Each structure stands twice: as structure tokens, then as C-alpha cells.
Amino acid sequence: MNRNYSQDLVVRPRRTRTDAWTRRLVAENRLSVDDLIWPVFLQEENGSSEVASMPGVKRYGPDCLVDAIGEAIDLDIPAIALFPYNNPATKTPDCREAYNPDNLICSATRAIRKHYKDVALIGDVALDPYNSDGHDGLLRNGIILNDETVEILCKQALAQVEAGCDYVGPSDMMDGRIGAIRDTLDEAGHTYAKIMSYTAKYASAFYGPFRDAVGAKGALKGDKKTYQMDPANSEEALRLVELDMQQGADMVMVKPGLAYLDIIQRIKSTFGVPTMAYQVSGEYAMIKAASANGWLDHDAVMMETLMAFKRAGTDAVLTYFALDAARILK
Ligand SMILES: NCc1[nH]cc(CCC(=O)O)c1CC(=O)O
């Protein structure tokens, strides 16, 4: 049969794109405020301070934290991840501030809990903001000590949960920490405290602005390649998901986000487990810088990237854009 396809098109894919209502009917993915986790930086001093490399992101002191959280709750954001900017004087090689029950995360958690019950609080579990050498684990003679670090992470996680965190988010990439933290929490009776594991966290150059935000940049000697993943690998990410799930992780995280959408998709299609993505500081900074120059449309690019996470199979996105996106979605 001879058909002239240009004049006799039966199937016209553009028919379902002709108008906004049809596009709405056939949209395969939807983004909602339920998909957003807002990362919040804490500081000891009252007031707030700007993070130069992350325009629009602030560190909040005790006197303005509760109001900032209130804003997120008014926008119906379901979860907040807490990260501390610690004064250099509190940083030591043994990282003892990490499990001080009055450290920034624990006191912020208690303060927020006094005012708000219905928002998930996620404590960040890793040693870098407390470590005088800026690493996520204890360092001895240039070596990161895995098992000794895990012992401290357990104490840190327990302190956060006892202060009122609903979730702990181990972002340190030590081996075996998920099982050890699960045991510690269970033994203390916190059977329902959840673990959002940073399972596939890559040794990425996209974290630069975050290290400014938590004041870890100056301190860090060397790189994190002996514990964070090699960007060349994806099979390894699947093995790590399997291990973390066996050890009791409730959800897994891929980090950074946009450059690792293939990892998200593989994890989701292989395991079907709750899969989170972290749109990290460098991803945020790139969009901010380009739109400040008038080179990109800020809101359009922001929403397009968030939709890309959904399309790849993400259940929720930890993003510095959470409030901006929630305002648009409302
Ligand atoms: N525990 C470290 C940690 N937790 C979150 C981020 C990065 C987040 C971001 O870039 O937004 C990092 C950076 C690092 O590994 O150095």
C-alpha cells in the first residue's frame, strides 16, 4: 500500500497538545506541595544571615526560626530538613557537639515542636558540621574511620530523635550505619522514628555552596571520595539500596539530583521503594545565577526541574526552592 504520510496523517500526536485542557487531561505526572521537603539552615546567633552563594537562602537564629517554619507550614509543606551552621569553636576532631542534646538541631527541634506538631522534622546525621577537619567521619592519620564514626552517628541520631525529630537523615556514607542507627533507635524504644538514608550520595562538585552555608568549606582538607560514590557508577547505587533496605531504611535518597536522574529511575523501577532526590546547593545556585543575569526564566526552569524529578520516579524532592515552588502550586 502506498500512503502519502504528509497528506494523509491518521495519527496526529499533536492533537493531544492543542489546548491547555487536553494537556491537563493527558499529563502523566503532577507535582504537588506534598512532594516538597524544605532544607533549613540553623545558626546560634539571633537574627538571620544570608548565604552568599545561595541567593534567597538564609540561616535562621533561634528568634526567627519558628516564624520561618510557620511560613512553610502555611504553605502546607510536609517536611523540613534541619542543617546546622556551627561556630568554629564548637568543632573538634572527636565531633562531640554532634550528640550534645542542646546542639543546634536538637534545640531547634524542641523549639519548633512547641509550636507545630504537624510537620515532619528531619535531622541531618553526619559529622561534617561538627568536625574541625570538615569530614563526615572521624579522621585519623588521614584515614576516615568507619566503625568509630558509626558509633557517634548512632548517638547523634538518638539525640535528634529524643529531641523530637521524626526522621533522621544519615548523609555521611559510612558502611553499616543504617543498621546500627536502626538498632540504637529501636533499643531506646523509638521503633517508629524513620530513617531517610542518603543511600546514593555521590562525591560531587555540586555541594560547594552548601559547604559555605554550614561553614564547612574552610575546614575541609582533601575530598570525600573514599566514602561518597564515584559519579561513574550506577550498579553500585543499586547494591547500596539493597543493603540499606535490608538494614531498615524507610526511604532512600539520591544526591545530587538532576545529573543523577538515571539513578533515580533505576532505583524506582528495580525496587519500587520510596525514593527521594536532593536538588543540591549547586543546582540551586546555577539556576539563581543564570536567572539573575536574565539568561533563564527562574520560575519556569525551577518548575521544569522539579517535574523532571517526578518523571524520573521521585516520590519527594528536598529542594531550596520548596517555598517558591509551593507558592506557585498553591
Ligand atoms: N553531610 C554532608 C552534606 N549534607 C548535605 C550536603 C550537600 C547539600 C547541598 O549541596 O545542598 C553535604 C555536602 C557534602 O557532602 O559535603
Image (cartoon, rainbow, N blue to C red):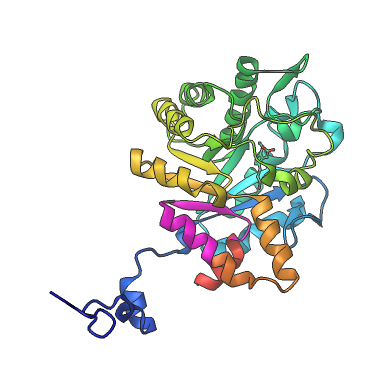
Q: Residue 268: within the magenta?
A: no
Where 127 sits versus 117, above or below?
above
Q: Residue at x 74, y 19 (%)?
A: 139
Question: Residues in magenta?
Answer: 304-321
Corner quadrant of residue 300: bottom right
Give the number of callouts: 0
Residue 306 shown left or right of residue 67 in the figure: left
Q: Nearer the viewer, residue 205 or 147?
A: 205
Is residue 70 among the parts visible in the rendering?
Answer: yes
Where 17 sits versus 281, above or below?
below
Residue 326 shown left or right of residue 29 in the figure: right
Q: Residue at x 68, y 24 (%)?
A: 137
Residue 39 shown left or right of residue 5 in the figure: right
Residue 142 location (% of width, % of height): 76, 18
Quadrant of the image where one finds ligand 1: top right
Residue 57 location (% of width, % of height): 72, 58
Q: Residue at x 60, y 21 (%)?
A: 150
Is residue 67 among the parts visible in the rendering?
Answer: no
Q: Nearer the viewer, residue 155 or 225?
A: 225
